[in-house]
Amino acid sequence: MPEAPFACVAAVWQRHEREVLQFLRRRLGDPHAAEDLLQDVFLKAMRAGRGFCVLENPRAWLFQVARTTLIDHHRTAHPTEPLPESFERTPATPADAAEPVDALAPCLDRALGRLAPEDARILRACDLEEQAQKAFAAAQGLSLPAAKARLRRARQRLRQELTAACGVEFDDGGRVSGHTPGSPQA
């Protein structure tokens, strides 16, 4: 009796294998990759065993699995190009150069000290200690949307404080691009 699920899978597979393969070929454009993914879909059907045999629409299940397998394939495919031989680090960008944000630790402590206690608390918990916003909200008796809004406003005030008190400069993407060491502590 243990072979019954495999017989069920094999019967359904024979009916739909060709159209699943065509589906994968159209989306990949590479017949060899499509055949590899087809085998992955088949293995998933075999692993489903008895669960596959009781499906109301096994064809739909096969196509759904084919779609998710295709998505996983695209997510993990990271084509790379070798760097040209002419690429070298210039003296302006040595390998051990610190990111501009790394030099802000003393200024960050000073700016956090100038914020309202509730702003400093949420920034320290969620951004510096990496506590989940949901956990922070629960610990403070807040709804998750309220905690998110509070964190967003606290980040805006911290940005203003860093700009004013530490001379921090931001690039177009909002990332720290530099600061003026020894800026007035006002």
Image (spheres, rainbow, N blue to C red):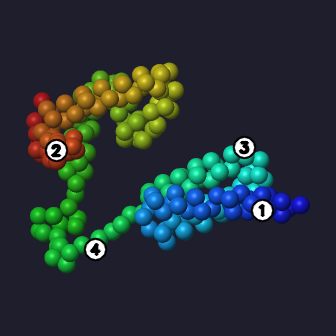
Is tag 1's residue or tag 4's residue first in the polypeptide sequence?
1
Tell whether label 4 touches label 3 (CB within 8 Å): no
Residue 17 in which image quadrant: bottom right
Instruction: State the mark number for residue 159.
Output: none
Q: Secondary structure at mark 3?
A: loop
Q: Position of residue 15 (x, y in %)?
A: 68, 59
Q: Position of residue 111 (x, y in %)?
A: 23, 34
- Residue assigned mark 4: 82
Which numbered disc, 1 or 2, marks the residue closer to the eye? 1
Amino acid under disc 3: Glu
The answer to whether residue 167 shows anywhere in this view is yes
Marks 3/2: CA–CA distance: 55 Å
Q: Nearer the viewer, residue 144 or 104?
A: 144
Instruction: State the mark number for residue 6.
Output: 1
Residue drawn where x is 12% and y is 30% of the image? 186
Does residue 142 sit above or below 95 in this rendering?
Answer: above
Is tag 3's residue or tag 1's residue first in the polypeptide sequence?
1
Q: Position of residue 83 (x, y in %)?
A: 24, 72
Which numbered disc, 3 or 1, marks the residue closer to the eye? 3
Is tag 2's residue or tag 4's residue first in the polypeptide sequence?
4
Marks 3/1: CA–CA distance: 17 Å
Q: Is residue 113 left or right of residue 42?
A: left
Q: Secondary structure at mark 4?
A: loop
How many C-alpha atoms fall within 10 Å of the one at disc 3: few (<14), some, or many (≥20)?
few
Q: Position of residue 5 (x, y in %)?
A: 79, 58
Q: Secondary structure at mark 2?
A: loop
- Residue assigned mark 2: 171
- Residue assigned mark 3: 56
Total residue callouts: 4
Amino acid under disc 4: Pro
Residue drawn where x is 56% and y is 55% of the image? 66
